[in-house]
């Protein structure tokens, strides 16, 4: 992989990451917290898990740069493990064990279920129209083979 390819890949991830971070902030600012629990972050992380499952199962590996943009960049910027860990730390510091355990369980199990659903949705066979579900680029597209 040449220097130019690495630079383009880095710019691709950065562009997706900036957009994902802005989307996360919009959700976090737009949804209320409940009893000090980061419900907006829960929504973001579970939704992001579903989207990442969909991206990795629906887009062929040959579409590497598109996967970098959407998966590593956009969804990576959208979701936030560090903010989740910080929320758990606050609940722990406040001695709110049941809330902390519940929030952690719902986040992890919800994310796992959402990722599985996204993978299943993305892996569904297409109707033979050249969509990503059959591992080939859509008709009229050369994919993203860089």
Image (cartoon, rainbow, N blue to C red):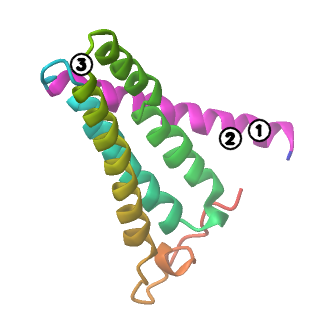
Question: In the image, residue 61 lies at what x, y percent?
Answer: 64, 64
Which residue range is magenta in the image? Answer: 2-31
- Specify which label sits upstream in the sequence, 2 or 3: 2
The 10 Å Cα crowd at callout 2, few under 14, some 14 to 19, many 20 or more, is some
Q: Do the residues labelled 2 and 3 touch (CB within 8 Å)?
A: no
Q: Does the magenta stretch include residue 14?
A: yes
26 displayed left or right of 117: left
Disc marking residue 96: 3
Question: In the image, residue 17 lies at what x, y percent?
Answer: 50, 32
Q: Does the magenta stretch include residue 97?
A: no
Q: Disc 1 marks which residue?
A: 6
Disc marking residue 19: none
For numbered disc 1, what is the local secondary structure?
Answer: helix
Q: Residue furthest bottom?
A: 128
Q: Disc 2 marks which residue?
A: 9
Rendered residue at 63%/33% (across/down):
11
Q: How far apart are marks 2 and 1 (CA)?
A: 5 Å
For numbered disc 2, what is the local secondary structure?
Answer: helix
Rendered residue at 52%/33% (across/down):
15
The 10 Å Cα crowd at callout 1, few under 14, some 14 to 19, many 20 or more, is few
- Specify which label sits upstream in the sequence, 1 or 3: 1
Q: Do the residues labelled 2 and 1 touch (CB within 8 Å)?
A: yes
| Residue 27 can be seen in this image | no
């Amino acid at each position: 992989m040449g220097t130019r390819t690495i630079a383009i890949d880095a710019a691709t991830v950065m562009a997706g990451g900036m957009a994902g971070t802005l989307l996360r902030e919009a959700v976090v600012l737009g949804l209320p917290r409940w009893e000090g629990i980061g419900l907006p972050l829960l929504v973001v992380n579970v939704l992001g898990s579903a989207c990442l499952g969909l991206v990795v199962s629906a887009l062929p590996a040959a579409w590497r740069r598109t996967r970098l943009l959407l998966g590593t960049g956009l969804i990576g910027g959208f979701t936030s493990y560090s903010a989740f860990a910080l929320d758990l730390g606050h609940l722990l510091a406040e001695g709110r064990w049941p809330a902390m355990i519940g929030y952690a369980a719902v986040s992890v199990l919800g994310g796992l279920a959402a990722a599985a659903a996204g993978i299943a949705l993305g892996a569904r066979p297409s109707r033979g129209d050249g969509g990503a579900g059959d591992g080939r680029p859509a008709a009229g597209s050369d994919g993203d083979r860089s």
